[in-house]
C-alpha cells in the first residue's frame, strides 16, 4: 500500500516540476516576443520547440476571438491550465 502511495506522490512531484518549468518557458517566450527576437537564435528556437506543442492547440481553440483583437491569448490560457493542474492534480496527490 505504501509503495503505491509513494509512487503516486513521486509522479505528482515530477508532474509539478514539469508544469512549473513549462510555466516559466511560456512566460519567457511571451516576454521575449515583445522585443521581436532573432528567429535564428538558438534560445528562441528552443523556446518555440518547447512551448509550441501546448500553445498551438490553444491558439486553434482561441482563433475566432484572437483574430478580432489581434492579441495572442494562448499563453494566458496556458497559464490558467497549468495553475489549475498544479492546484488540482498535484495538490490532490501530495496530501
Image (cartoon, helix red, strand yellow):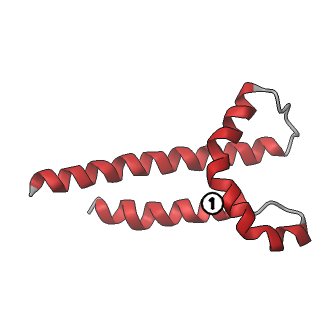
User: Position of 11 compared to 27: left or right?
Assistant: left
Vertical arrangement, residue 10 with respect to residue 95, above or below: above
User: Position of 5 compared to 53: left or right?
Assistant: left
Q: Residue at x 75, y 69 (%)?
A: 62
64 or 5: nearer the eye?
64
What residue does disc 1 label?
78
Q: Quadrant of the C terminus?
A: bottom left
Residue 80's x, y, as percent? 59, 65
Residue 59's x, y, as percent? 74, 61
* SS for dot 1: helix
Residue 87's x, y, as percent? 44, 65
The mark total stands at 1
3 or 20: nearer the eye?
3
35 or 2: nearer the eye?
2
Residue 40's x, y, as percent? 81, 27
When asked about the image quadrant of residue 72, the answer is bottom right
Q: Quadrant of the N terminus?
A: bottom left
Name, please, the residue furthest toward the left.
Answer: 1
Q: Residue at x 51, y 48 (%)?
A: 20
User: Position of 69 compared to 13: left or right?
Assistant: right
Vertical arrangement, residue 8 with respect to residue 37, above or below: below
Q: Residue at x 26, y 53 (%)?
A: 9
Amino acid at each position: 500500500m505504501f509503495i503505491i502511495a509513494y509512487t503516486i506522490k513521486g509522479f505528482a512531484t515530477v508532474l509539478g516540476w514539469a508544469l512549473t518549468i513549462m510555466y516559466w518557458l511560456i512566460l519567457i517566450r511571451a516576454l521575449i516576443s515583445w522585443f521581436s527576437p532573432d528567429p535564428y537564435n538558438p534560445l528562441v528556437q528552443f523556446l518555440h520547440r518547447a512551448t509550441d506543442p501546448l500553445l498551438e492547440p490553444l491558439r486553434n481553440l482561441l482563433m475566432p476571438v484572437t483574430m478580432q483583437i489581434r492579441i495572442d491569448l494562448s499563453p494566458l490560457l496556458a497559464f490558467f491550465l497549468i495553475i489549475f493542474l498544479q492546484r488540482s492534480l498535484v495538490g490532490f496527490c501530495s496530501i
